[in-house]
Image (spheres, helix red, strand yellow):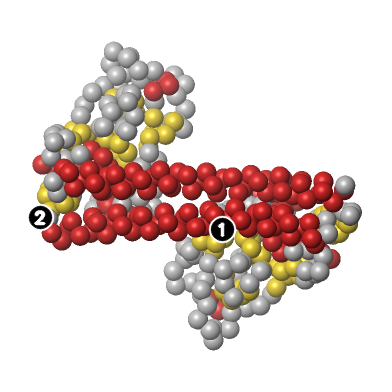
């Protein structure tokens, strides 16, 4: 067995088909995670590009982020005219699935970034890709390593489907509670906290920001020369949120301190706690905050001119179901199981990403023997 060197331009062909409007085709965008729902509603699809099964779709302006995907899902679909589409024309030499493993490597993304050209923004085109040289093992070896990748990918996809089923159970449970339980005003269960770091009990390592994923994160602010005395203390099971919502799209930055240590955060954040955990579990309230319905509610009820804010009075006016604590705990347990599985799923996806260079290297070394 041996390796054979080719220019990709000898093996691929750009597809230049436009949507004719006659078929009802699904429209998808592309990110480094694969195909995603398009962000533009009501776009002019008459200029959209059409792609088929085993076509590659990529964003020319985001190839340094590896925004490229192999279509294994749709017989025929469409994408923004800003994207480019190509397919493997010499499948007797190169398997599309093997090329997919090849392009999913960080090394490939770095090379795309280096080769991209432009003025205001760099673009990487099919013409650039066609100049890349690739060493290919025989089809039998390609297929062997594609099978390994497909097995891992199928396992992750199966796990992800179970994950979404679990989330649907949790959401359905809460929706049913809203029907059978009278809604309660949140302000009757929570109160503001105003503990400051005046004694400097906490230092720079304890400073946290809040993400739109409802998590405390290491601060991204430049803390040089900043006094930590006015910073607010967030004790375990206390909540903090950023009142400004206009800069976060459809999400509000809010988090519960689910650790066993205290954090400190900007004095501009609102800190609050549950008054009586015997009637309302902080974990249950945290779960409600993570729902997309709450994000939409907070955004809709934000007010302002230069910037819109979801202030404390609006937070207190939120209405939600408060079942018996035992029922709250049951839902929290389901939600915790969902979060654990979600974390495992992210690790599986990460493993798939990092296995790509190993598979390419393994196939090349086997062909050299």
Q: Mark 2: few, some, or many residues within 10 Å (few <14, many ≥20)?
A: few
x, y percent for residue 318: 18, 49
Q: Give me the residue at 31% from left, 52% from top.
A: 291
Q: Give me the residue at 76% from left, 58% from top.
A: 142
x, y percent for residue 14: 73, 70
Query: Which-is-in-front pick, marks 1 and 2?
Result: 1
Q: Earlier in the sequence, mark 1 or mark 2?
A: 1
x, y percent for residue 218: 44, 31
Query: Quick one: quadrant of the N terminus?
Result: bottom right
x, y percent for residue 158: 49, 58
Looking at the rendered structure, the number of numbered marks drawn on it comes to 2
**SS at badge 2:** loop
Q: Residue 182 carries which label?
A: 2
Q: Mark 1: few, some, or many residues within 10 Å (few <14, many ≥20)?
A: few
Let me know if residue 168 appears in the view.
Answer: yes
Above or below residue 245? Residue 10 is: below
Q: Give me the residue at 32% from left, 33% from top.
A: 258
- Side of 154 where 213 appears, left or right: left
- Side of 40 where 101 appears, left or right: right
Q: Residue 154 carries which label?
A: 1
Quadrant of res 130: bottom right
Q: Which of 223 and 25 is in front in this view?
A: 25
The Cα atoms of the two marked residues, 1 and 2, are separated by 44 Å
Q: Which mark is residue 362?
A: none
Q: Give me the residue at 68% from left, 49% from top.
A: 356
């Amino acid at each position: 067995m041996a390796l054979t060197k080719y220019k990709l331009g000898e093996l691929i062909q750009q597809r230049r088909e436009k949507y004719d409007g006659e078929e009802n085709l699904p429209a998808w965008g592309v990110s480094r995670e694969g195909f995603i729902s398009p962000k533009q509603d009501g776009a002019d699809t008459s200029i959209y590009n059409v792609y088929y099964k085993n076509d590659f779709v990529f964003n020319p302006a985001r190839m340094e982020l590896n925004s490229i995907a192999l279509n294994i899902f749709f017989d025929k679909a469409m994408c923004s005219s800003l994207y480019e589409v190509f397919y493997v024309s010499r499948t007797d030499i190169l398997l599309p699935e093997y090329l997919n493993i090849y392009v999913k490597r960080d090394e490939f993304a770095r090379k795309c970034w280096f080769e991209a050209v432009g003025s205001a923004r760099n673009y990487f085109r099919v013409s650039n890709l066609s100049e890349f040289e690739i060493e290919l093992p025989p089809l039998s070896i390609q297929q062997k390593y594609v099978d390994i990748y497909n097995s891992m990918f199928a396992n992750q996809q199966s796990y992800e489907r179970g994950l979404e089923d679990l989330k649907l159970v949790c959401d359905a449970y809460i929706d049913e509670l809203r029907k059978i339980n009278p809604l309660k005003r949140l302000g009757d269960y929570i109160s503001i906290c105003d503990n400051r770091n005046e004694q400097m009990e906490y230092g720079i390592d304890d400073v946290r920001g809040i993400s739109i994923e409802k998590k405390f994160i290491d601060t991204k602010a430049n803390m040089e020369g900043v006094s930590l005395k006015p910073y607010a203390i967030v004790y375990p099971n206390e909540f903090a949120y950023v009142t400004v919502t206009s800069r976060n799209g459809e999400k509000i930055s809010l988090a519960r301190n689910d650790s066993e240590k205290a954090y400190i955060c900007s004095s501009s954040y609102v800190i609050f706690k549950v008054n009586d955990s015997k009637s309302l579990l902080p974990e249950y309230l945290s779960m409600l905050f993570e729902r997309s319905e709450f994000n939409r509610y907070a955004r809709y009820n934000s007010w302002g001119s230069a910037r819109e804010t979801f202030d404390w009075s609006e937070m207190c006016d939120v209405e939600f179901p408060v079942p018996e604590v035992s029922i709250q705990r049951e839902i929290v347990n389901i939600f915790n199981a969902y979060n654990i599985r979600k974390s495992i799923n992210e690790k599986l996806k990460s493993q798939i990403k990092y296995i790509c260079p190993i598979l390419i290297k393994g196939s090349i070394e086997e062909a050299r023997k």
